């Protein structure tokens, strides 16, 4: 997939960080220390990004296990910086968890230290999967891109961030009718989606919008500028769960994250 997070984040955005020059050698770009201890396993890892012979490389050492080495391309480097951005604003675990998870990142400009991380946080696993692709380590993402359909009427829409997503009501309705006849046990969900897109008063399903965004191609319109987006990019994890992250690709090929199914604050 050619679209990833394509913008690096300026130093002016750093929050709650400290200079970390003393933690890195001259040729090193960043180092991440990851510690997980829990009932279902433990891991202590160190990930190092460094420069060698004019290229960027990654070295992952899992204590008591294996050392992995990989060349890092631009998309991998972009994803690394998006990982740092998420780590900066990561909140502590709020509920009960038997896993103790912490992560500290040292870069040339800052130190980001997070402790008591939510035990469902898997971003370090995805970072390993991206940087060491093909080495059977970490998790990987799948991507689905839907090109904005400018022929869809501006009738029914759902809004995330600064974008409205319009859907073809007739197409969705026909699909719901077909699926309700399949008798697969999900008839209440299909009925709820049909009711919502046709504006029939009812208690709509909490997952209706996720179904719409995932199954159908929308027309994407910026709420403020009325500019139409280029496409909807959906990032799915490799476990086929409901965890999805949604991005809008603008006509200028900028990538804007609009919603993470695990964090409704977007």
Image (cartoon, helix red, strand yellow):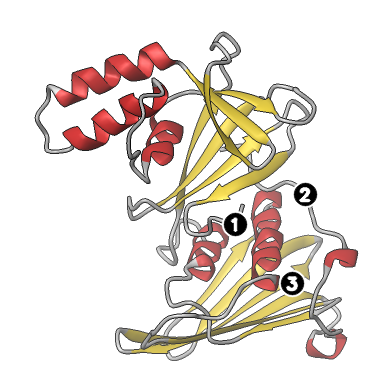
Residue at 62% from the left image edge and 25% from the top image edge: 220
Q: Helix, strand, or loop for circle 2?
A: loop
Is residue 238 shown above or below 84? Answer: above
Going from N to C along the chain, the mark reached first, 3 or 1, is: 3
Which tag is nearer the camera, tag 1 or tag 2? Answer: 1
Residue density around tag 3, few if under 14, some if 14–19, many if 20 or more, within 10 Å:
many
- Residue 204 occupies which quadrant of the picture? top left
Is 17 displayed left or right of 61 in the figure?
right
How would you rate the neighbour count of disc 2 (Cα within 10 Å): few for under 14, some for 14-19, many for 20 or more? few
Q: Which residue is drawn at 58% across and 36% down?
A: 159
Q: Name the residue under label 3.
A: 50
Q: Position of residue 106 (x, y in %)?
A: 74, 81
Circle nearer the N terminus (1, 2): 2
Q: Residue at x 43, y 61 (%)?
A: 139
Task: Say which residue label 2 marks.
Answer: 7
Q: Quadrant of the image for the N terminus?
A: top right
Out of 137 and 146, give the one closest to the viewer: 146
Q: How far apart are marks 3 and 2 (CA)?
A: 20 Å
Front one among 168 and 34: 168
According to the picture, the residue beneath numbered tag 1 turns out to be 265
Residue mark closest to the camera, 3 vs 1: 1
- Residue lying furthest left in this view? 183
- Residue found at x 58% / y 87%: 115
């Amino acid at each position: 997939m050619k679209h990833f997070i394509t913008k690096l984040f300026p130093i002016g955005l750093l929050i709650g960080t400290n200079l970390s020059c003393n933690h890195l050698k001259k040729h090193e770009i960043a180092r991440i220390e990851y510690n997980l201890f829990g009932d279902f396993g433990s891991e202590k890892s160190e990930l190092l990004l460094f420069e060698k012979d004019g290229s960027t490389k990654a070295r992952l050492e899992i204590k008591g296990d294996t050392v992995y080495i990989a060349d890092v391309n631009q998309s991998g480097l972009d994803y690394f910086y998006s990982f740092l951005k998420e780590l900066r604003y990561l909140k502590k675990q709020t509920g009960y968890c038997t896993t103790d998870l912490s992560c500290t990142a040292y870069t040339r400009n800052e130190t980001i230290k997070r402790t008591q991380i939510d035990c469902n946080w898997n971003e370090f696993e995805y970072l390993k999967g991206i940087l060491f692709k093909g080495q059977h380590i970490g998790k990987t993402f799948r991507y689905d891109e839907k090109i904005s359909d400018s022929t869809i009427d501006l009738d029914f829409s759902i809004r995330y961030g600064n974008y409205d997503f319009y859907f073809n009501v007739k197409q969705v309705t026909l699909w719901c009718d077909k699926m309700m006849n399949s008798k697969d046990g999900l008839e209440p969900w299909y009925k709820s989606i049909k009711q919502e897109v046709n504006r029939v008063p009812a208690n709509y399903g909490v997952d209706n919008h996720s179904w719409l965004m995932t199954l159908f191609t929308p027309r994407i319109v910026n709420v403020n500028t009325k500019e139409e987006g280029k496409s909807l990019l959906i990032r799915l994890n490799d476990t086929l769960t409901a965890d999805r992250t949604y991005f809008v690709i603008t006509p200028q090929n900028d990538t804007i994250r609009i919603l993470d199914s695990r964090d409704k604050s977007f």
